[in-house]
Image (cartoon, helix red, strand yellow):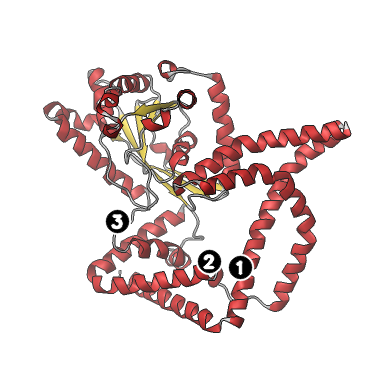
Amino acid sequence: MGIKRIDKKSYPYLFLKQFVAFWHNRVFYRRIVILNRENIPKNAHLIFTGNHQNALMDALVFLHGYKGRLVFLARSDIFKNPFIAAILYFLRMLPVFRIKDGYSAVKKNDDIFQKTIDVIKNKIGLVIMAEGNHGEQHRLRTLKKGFARIAFQTEEANDFQLDMKVIPVGIDYSNYQNFRTELLINFGNPIPVSDYYDAYKESPAIAINQMKEQLADSLIPLMVHIKSEKHYELYNQLREIYKHEMAQKMGFPSSNQPYKLQMDQELIRRLELFEEKYPEQMDDFQALVLRYQQNIQKEKLSYAIVRNKVGSNTLLIIETLLFVLASPMFVLGWILNYIPFGLSIYIGLKMKDPQFKSSVKFVLSMFVWPLFHLIETWVVWLIFTDWMLALAFFIAMPILGIFARWYWISLLEFKEAFRWARLKKNKAEVYQMIRKDQKEILNKMKAIVAQN
């Protein structure tokens, strides 16, 4: 499928979309929370755009959150290889050329923009990440003008009769890179392009900037936005350190989504007020939090484990015995599933850009694991020539894989608890420093929250 047929229906694409949705929604993420999907107008001409922090995974957000057809705009450099370009066109992606690609390349945007007009006119949603590229910080960066230009050019080509809407979408990940984490998708109120018709007819440049500013103003309430440059790490670490206290303060039943977004936004708001009133205290506070973070990381601990009291020796012995008893089942599940999942994790870790790690893990696990599963089942059938045994193996393999992952995560948490217990006994000074810093941070935050 080439660029000319990108807006046409394709049954192979629909099949692949369903499979990707299953892997995305049921396997890769533990939980997906969608807010305000009712804000999406039905049977309308739409452009979707959201904050861009996690490479390909951000695009998949829209496939999951919106039930209609979509076409995506992506940077042109990933289309250089003809084979890759053919795959991307099949996946409903169009290239956008930038000045750094060369002035001759930028002229190709005329054909792309013409195609986007056809896409939108046919009521296929167009997805544009308005920040232009992804960034790892929880912050809305400066938006590009492309989405607004496309909106106005499409309306102009249709005598301003389409009544297009721009849909802002906030995206938040509990962890950018790991399997089985949480994802929040938050749809904002539509921005009618018609609000800017008069301004565009008088001055396109002014209208484009006005729409860009409104989109930024609409996106920020939908996401985690830490605008402080100097004290970004302070804000970001406190989101995790103080989350349980913040949930209790706000009367939420847990610190998971959708409450986590509201908690983070309120915590950031109160820290900003405190920084405005007492800027001289922020440097010392950040130094304290970073020291606390570094000491925990040095001992290979987490914020979650140091919140807990050190477990008793009896409990540690019982847990050790349970892990030993369950180890044969873990080893079997690990062996049967190691290559597909281990390969995706290994290659993901090799990626230079950390924001591409989850994308690589997702794509490789989605294709390699089912293929490997079928090959192993076929080998079992060849060896034993018993279709009942092969079927039992086919069913047992994913169950054993789930158990193996649960065992491994639990084992890591157990080892962490064991290190925490040893730290108290063998490095009492470091243990006391961590406890002291933790208490000071929590007291400081309690005072900040109380003042605001």
Q: Nearer the viewer, residue 156 or 74?
A: 74
Mark 3 and mark 2: Cα distance apart in space:
26 Å
Whether residue 396 sits left or right of residue 10 in the image: it is: right
Q: Amino acid at mark 3?
A: Lys
Residue receiving disc 3: 227
* Mark 1 nearby-residue class (10 Å; few <14, some 14–19, many ≥20): some
Residue 276 coordinates in the image, percent (x, y) = 23, 66
Question: Mark 3 or mark 1, which is nearer the start of the sequence?
Answer: 3
Residue shown at 34%/73% (left/top)?
Answer: 285
Mark 2 lies on residue: 302
Which residue is located at x 36 percent, y 26 percent? 44
Callout 2–callout 1 Cβ contact below 8 Å: yes
Q: Which corner quadrant holds the C terminus?
A: bottom left
Q: Position of residue 424 (x, y in %)?
A: 58, 80
The one nearer the camera, 131 or 224, is 131
Mark 1 lies on residue? 416
